[in-house]
Image (cartoon, rainbow, N blue to C red):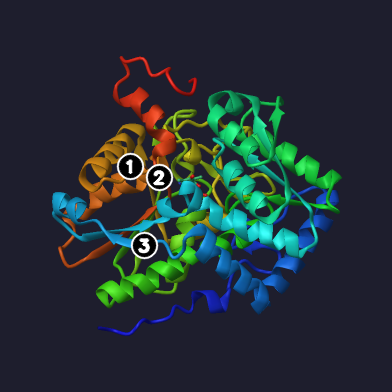
Amino acid sequence: MTEFAPSSTTQKHPWPDARGRYGAFGGRFVPETLMYALDELERAYESAREDAAFQETLHTYRQDYVGRPTPLYFAARFTEALGGAKVYFKREDLAHTGAHKINNALGQCLLAKRMGKTRIIAETGAGQHGVATATASALLGLKCVVYMGAEDIERQKLNVFRMRLLGSEVVTVESGSKTLKDAINEALRDWVAHVEDTHYVLGTVHGPHPFPMICRDFQSVIGREARKQIFEKEGRLPDTLIACVGGGSNAVGLFYEFIGDESVRMIGVEAGGTAIKPGEHAARFDGGAYGMLHGAISYVLQDEYGQIGSTHSVSAGLDYASVGPEHAYFHDSGRVEYTHVSDDEALDGFQRCSELEGIIPALESAHAIAHAMKVVPAMNKDRIVIVNMSGRGDKDVQQAARFILPDEDWSGGAKA
Ligand SMILES: *Cc1c(COP(=O)(O)O)cnc(C)c1O
């Protein structure tokens, strides 16, 4: 067996540059009042990154609380059914709270504590990042306030209850479209007003520098583990990595450690929704253009006047008008390929994975699975594919039921 070969990606830190740019993307486009907070955060993060005691604390919580390393699982029946490459799942669905989001929430809350902050704020759309942040805040004894659009609160009552159960306050956002992007605006406003005692835990690899870098670094534990695990199991690098892309944190988390390995093909899968037409999807690399949202330059779904476009996906976690700036950079440089799958294809992946493997995937992860179902059959049997199972699907069964069996009444349990 070949010895485990360490990657050099993380030692080089070639990007972002000093201004937080990834090529033409990224940066820090915020009001002057936030510059102080972002500078302070950047300095604190750089010092924590080099601090062995901080890394040790993070490692211990990852192991004993989150349940890391998560397994790299050989999906034998899924592989057999597709009849091509060997497919492995990186099991982020087995992390505490059921998805990769805890990796970032835990890291940022520990960082906040190290900075002497006592109060945490976060934005959330479907509630997954809110729950992860409420969890990490409870763990570390931090006060937590989560901003959530009124529309989303209505749709996600159980997650709102979860956050309150975990001791967090959930603030209803009534402005704009009353969804995620309005919640982000409110959270940024709160941060400006309370920066002395408050840290803002941003949920994905987006927003002003240094957030995309910090979130990427905390999520890159996924790829570091996967790289070690595939060497242990197969004695070599994988041929292809596949991950779904909302903001892009689980994808870059898996990809980052392999970026320097030229033989490894990487595919990011966006939400194709019902059609690639305005308002019907969230495939930023197919319908989007160079633009700015939430303090960073990236690909953005927008109209001809630069107004942010509306989006749709069967999966709430992929339903965002922009994508992390590092992905925009990977896209333009050609290092990562981006594609999209439709709602129907994702639902098919959701069912096939459940039947064949006894794993109900999150609808987000089902996008990555659906793309694997397209490309794996044409690959040689000696090839190796890793699909990032970003989360478990318990949260999505009701939504899926509505789409798969639309004629039945699914109003029992949580309200629609
Ligand atoms: C939030 C979420 C995503 C999308 O977010 P990324 O930042 O793109 O990873 C994907 N999968 C699951 C399970 C999620 O909860």
Q: Splitting the image into 4 quarters, where does residue 5 fall?
A: bottom left
Report, in whole angstroms, how far the alpha carbon at label 3 lies from the one at label 2.
14 Å
Residue plotted at (79% across, 62% down): 39
Q: Is mark 2 within 8 Å of ligand 1?
A: yes
Q: Please state which amino acid type lies under the numbered disc 3.
A: Pro
Disc 1 packing (10 Å; few <14; some 14–19; many ≥20): many
Q: Are marks 1 and 2 in contact (CB under 8 Å)?
A: yes
Whole-percent x and y of residue 150? Answer: 64, 25
Amino acid type at image mark 2: Arg
Residue 360 image label: 1
Report the quarter where the N terminus lies: bottom left
Q: Nearer the viewer, residue 132 or 219?
A: 132
Residue marked by disc 3: 71
Residue at 63% in and 61% down: 214
- Mark 3 and mark 2 lie on one chain; the one further toward the N terminus is 3
Is 27 left or right of 71, judged from the image as shown? Answer: right
Q: Is residue 197 left or right of residue 134?
A: right
- Mark-to-mark CA distance, 1 and 3: 16 Å
